[in-house]
Structures are given as structure tokens and as C-alpha cells.
Image (cartoon, grey):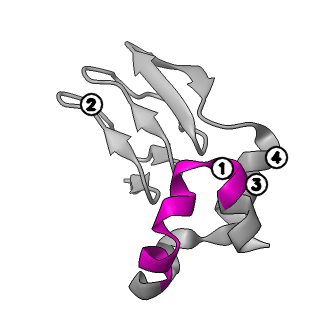
């Protein structure tokens, strides 16, 4: 059977059903009680039965920056030093460029 994969920085609500072979992209949010039958794109918010994209958390350009940064692989001291910049995407973009 194909493997299910869950990216980094993903939020999955309670009572979600994810069958084998589904890919949940980095930064996605899956609403509680959802039944995920298709792959979820990075930084998408999905919900329902079947789960559908409600919206994306960021613009396409911002998503590219977030994915390219691979901030989840940064050393913990770098994350701590820059923690304040994580609350604003424009400030975050300044530290990764």
C-alpha cells in the first residue's frame, strides 16, 4: 500500500480520517472531523467530507519563500534568535534572504 506522508508544521484537528497514500503538504491545516481523500497542497486549509481547500494561508510567492527556507531544519538557536520574525511573513522574508 502507498505510504501516507505528512509535511512539516502541519496541524491536524481531532477525528480526522486520512487513508493510506495521501500526502499532506508542509504548513497545511486539516479541520477537525475532515475526511481527506486527496493530497493537500502546502499551506492549504482544508475541511469537510470530503476535505476541500477552503483557502491558502499565504500567497503563492510567500509559500515559495517558506518552503525554500526549510526553516524547520534550522538549528534551534537560529530559530530562537529569530523567533519574533516568525509572526510576520514580511519580517520572516527579510531573515531568509
Of discs 1 and 3, which sits in the foreground?
A: 1
Residue 32 horizontal/vertical position (percent): 26, 24
**Magenta stretch, residue numbers:** 78-91
User: Disc 3 designates what residue?
Assistant: 64
Residue 70 seen in the current view: yes
Asked if the stretch drawn in magenta spans residue 53, the answer is: no
Q: Residue at x 41, y 54 (%)?
A: 6
Viewer-nearest residue: 82 or 59: 82
Q: Residue at x 80, y 73 (%)?
A: 97
Q: Earlier in the sequence, mark 3 or mark 2?
A: 2
Of discs 2 and 1, which sits in the foreground?
A: 1
Q: Callout 2: few (<14), some (14-19), or many (20+) C-alpha neighbours within 10 Å?
A: some
Vertical order, 68 against 89 (above or below)? below
Disc number at residue 41? none
Callout 2 touching callout 4 (CB < 8 Å)? no
Residue 20 seen in the current view: no
Q: CA distance from mark 3 to mark 2?
A: 28 Å
Q: CA distance from mark 2 to mark 1?
A: 31 Å
Magenta stretch, main secondary structure class: helix
User: Disc 1 designates what residue?
Assistant: 89
Callout 3 touching callout 4 (CB < 8 Å)? yes
Which type of secondary structure does the marked residue at label 2 adopt? loop
Which type of secondary structure does the marked residue at label 3 adopt? helix
Q: Callout 1: few (<14), some (14-19), or many (20+) C-alpha neighbours within 10 Å?
A: some
Q: Callout 3: few (<14), some (14-19), or many (20+) C-alpha neighbours within 10 Å?
A: few
Disc number at residue 61? 4
67 left or right, relative to 50: right
Residue 44 horizontal/vertical position (percent): 57, 34
Q: CA distance from mark 1 to mark 3?
A: 12 Å
Amino acid at each position: 500500500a502507498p505510504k501516507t506522508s505528512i509535511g512539516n508544521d502541519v496541524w491536524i484537528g481531532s477525528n480526522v480520517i486520512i487513508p493510506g497514500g495521501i500526502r499532506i503538504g508542509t504548513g497545511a491545516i486539516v479541520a477537525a472531523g475532515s475526511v481527506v481523500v486527496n493530497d493537500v497542497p502546502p499551506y492549504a486549509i482544508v475541511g469537510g467530507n470530503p476535505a476541500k481547500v477552503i483557502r491558502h494561508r499565504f500567497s503563492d510567492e510567500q509559500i515559495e519563500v517558506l518552503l525554500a527556507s526549510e526553516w524547520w531544519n534550522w538549528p534551534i538557536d537560529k530559530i530562537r534568535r529569530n523567533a519574533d520574525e516568525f509572526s510576520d511573513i514580511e519580517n520572516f522574508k527579510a531573515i531568509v534572504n
